[in-house]
Amino acid sequence: MARIPEISSKTGLATSTVAAILRDQPGFKPETRRRVLRVAKELGYRPNYLGRALAGGKSMTIGIVAPMLQARIAQMQITPVASAAEQRGYLAYLVTSDSDLPRSMLSCVENLLDRRIDGLMLFSELPLPEETLAPLKQRPVPTVFLHWAPDSNVTCVRRDFERGIRQVVDHLVSLGHRRVGLTMSAFTYRYPQHKFQIYQETLRAAGIEVVTDASWVHDTSGDRDNDFAQSGYHLIRKQLQKSRQDFPTAVIFESDEAAAGGIRAITEAGLRVPQDVSVVGFDDLPFARTMRPSLTTVHQPRSEFGQKAFEMLH
């Protein structure tokens, strides 16, 4: 494997100049930069990131901590982060905890900091305890919070759930619905302040009767594949078997996957979507447009979300 002195010799440039260009430092002419990078590639040069990090330089790595990757939308938000990092020459470590337990999250953060990452992204839908954030104060690195942030002084990227929920409610009101079923995931049922309360308050403020209780929870915790479509299907099937006559004229799902399962249960029961029952999802996953009937859903800027998060970190 080539070393910096060899590149210096072949390009006729000082080793300090070559080293600076290979570290992506500014201040060099484009032609000089292209010459160094071309020769480095020809000689098979590979940067020693570990040695650089140990010497107090950049490791060219970032860490991503995500407590929940069950939902497809969460996966689709993280992928652009890794892609944007790669384009800038960074390697992204993705670490997922099995739960939202503070101890699990704390372990993820500490393990990444031990690897001398240059920056960190923390995905969390819920407030993180001081215990989890303590290592960042002891060993500070540039950090971007996703969805939740400890205070207004940190960098954070979040989705505007309230705006999306208002769009859902306005749509259902415009169609004349006055009785709406509100499904929720087990996560939202455990932490209603996350989205569930916003849904209920917005629906009731619009004069809509909200049909929901513990029986409207779809839970994938016992499903190894986290099949939201299947859980949505079983939930609606049970509700229709329990009381088809009193079934709401519209149903809101937190995800497109669960909504797809709900539509299947509704049509199997002999009802039509949207003529008899309107269904609304949230995510705008690619399959939503190819379904028959197509799914009414709220778009989320998946790629923009991840790219913006990395730009802010960088």
Image: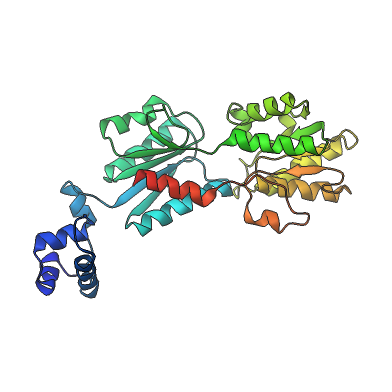
Task: Reply above or below: 10 against 215.
Answer: below
Q: Is residue 198 left or right of residue 52?
A: right
Task: Reply above or below: 78 against 127.
Answer: below
Residue at x 14%, y 65% (from the top left corner): 4
Q: Is residue 226 left or right of residue 51?
A: right
- Residue 187 seen anywhere in this rendered image of the structure: no
Rendering coords of residue 113 (x, y %): 30, 41
Nearest the viewer among 65 and 41 is 41
Residue at x 42%, y 45% (from the top left corner): 309
Q: Is residue 18 left or right of residue 273?
A: left
For residue 286, what is the image quadrant?
bottom right
Rendering coords of residue 21 (x, y %): 19, 60
Total numbered labels: 0
Rendering coords of residue 17 (x, y %): 13, 61
Q: Dividing the image into 4 quarters, which one contains the N terminus?
A: bottom left
Residue at x 68%, y 53% (from the top left corner): 288
Rendering coords of residue 147 (x, y %): 49, 36
Task: Reply above or below: 17 against 2.
Answer: above
- Residue 110 seen anywhere in this rendered image of the structure: yes
Q: How is the image coloured?
A: rainbow
Nearest the viewer among 101 and 10 is 10
Residue at x 38%, y 43% (from the top left corner): 312
**Farthest residue in the right direction?**
245
